[in-house]
Image (tube, coloured by chain):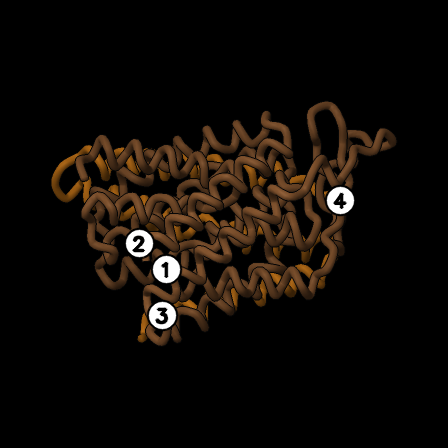
Chain colours: A orange, B brown
Amino acid sequence: MNSFKALSRVMQVALVATFACAVGGAFIPGSIGRVSGTACIMLLIAAPVVRVGWLVVNWTRVRDTRFALLGCVLLLVLAASGTIALVR
Amino acid sequence: MNPVTLAIAAFITAAIGTLGGLGGAILLVPILVLSGMEAKYAAPLGLVSVAAGSLAAAPHQLKAQVVNQRLGVATEIAASSAALIGALVSGLLGHALLSVLLGVVALVAAFAGARRKGIRNLPDPTLSIADVGEIPGTLAGVYPLGDEFVPYRANRLPLGLLGMGMAGLISGLSGVGGGWVKTPTASEIMHVPVKVAAATSTFTVGVTAAVGLLVYESQGRIVISDAALVAAAGLIGGTVGVRLQHVLPPPLVRRGLSAILAVIGVLLIVRR
């Protein structure tokens, strides 16, 4: 069985950081609030991608190559989706 | 919509979305549109709520090992690919037809969940806390249910992938997350326990929402102050939702999910 405690801690840090940025974006006026809110959105975008990346590394380490490859495919699909959607 | 009402709506929809693995956008976006917000600004806020709920649930669900990430990654490939196709052809379907299709899917999913009685996956007394988690190389695992441990295995993978692909297609076509299709697909088609299905769906909707948010951000469609408020409320709501999911019995979660899906289905058909 795998333990995902390390990933859980990473997500906990991301959660706290995102919440702090969200509160700043919601309640601090002016450019500081705008930067804080934008950072919150960037963290929300980055967190699941980091999570999938972490899983790929973890599965590669435990030699679960089939699922590590699937994780890579998912990252590629996400990159392709993002790129196609951005250039449309 | 005034900020207090927006925060309350985001809190409640994120809590319900995380509890049932629905994502929350399917509830929040109609509320925002009905309150007078333009759909092009409501949709990004819906995705912010989904991403916030997903992130809020992650630490707890990972620690409890209730989410099957191998299942999530395997099925998300189908969902994300189909979402891309759906987004590319989204102009071809009329809004009214799309609403009716979504409504029918929601009602079928509600019926499938409500029809079933009892618990499909029973605890195994020979298992211990050391067995909890995913089984490497498979779509199987063991999850904790109170003081007991329940083994499960995702069945009917081709049919499940088809369902997840449909969830992605719907997501791409409509702009709302597909969690409300993913959870019933994993639970009712693939026979994954509803709590694992909901937790896994909560993980994957966050992945899908990330791509959508990237696009909305690049298009300048995100009102930062509103999005930050929705994110803050969604993070709190998601944390509450995941705690509730942990303590509520699976049949109650399933029935509650069916009731919410039935309401969504009726709303989609009536509002077209």
Q: Residues within 10 Å of mark 2 (few under 14, many from 20)?
A: many
**Of marks 3 and 2, the one in the foreground:** 2
User: What chain letter is assigned to the residue under label 4?
Assistant: B
Are marks 1 and 2 in one subunit? yes
For marks 2 and 4, the one nearer the N-term is 2
Tag 3 secondary structure? helix
- Residue B160 higher or lower than A16, as above or below: below
From the top left corner, tell me how far across and down residue A72 is, in percent: 58, 64
Contact flag, marks 1 and 4 (Cβ < 8 Å): no
Numbered mark located on residue B7 in the image: none
Contact flag, marks 1 and 2 (Cβ < 8 Å): yes
From the top left corner, tell me how far across and down residue B120 is, in percent: 74, 41
For marks 1 and 4, the one nearer the N-term is 4
Q: Residue furthest right?
A: B126
**Of marks 3 and 1, the one in the foreground:** 1
**From the viewer's perspective, is A75 left or right of B67?**
left
Residue at 52% of width from left, 28% of height from top?
B243
Residue at 75% of width from left, 40% of height from top?
B121
Contact flag, marks 2 and 4 (Cβ < 8 Å): no
**Of marks 3 and 4, the one in the foreground:** 4
User: What chain letter is assigned to the residue under label 1?
Assistant: B
From the top left corner, tell me how far across and down residue A33 is, in percent: 19, 40
What amino acid is at disc 3? Ala
**From the viewer's perspective, is B267 left or right of B140?**
left
Tag 1 secondary structure? loop
Q: Residues within 10 Å of mark 1 (few under 14, many from 20)?
A: many
Are marks 3 and 2 in one subunit? no
Residue tagged 4: B152
Residue tagged 1: B175
Tag 4 secondary structure? strand
**From the viewer's perspective, is B139 left or right of B212?**
right
Residue tagged 2: B43
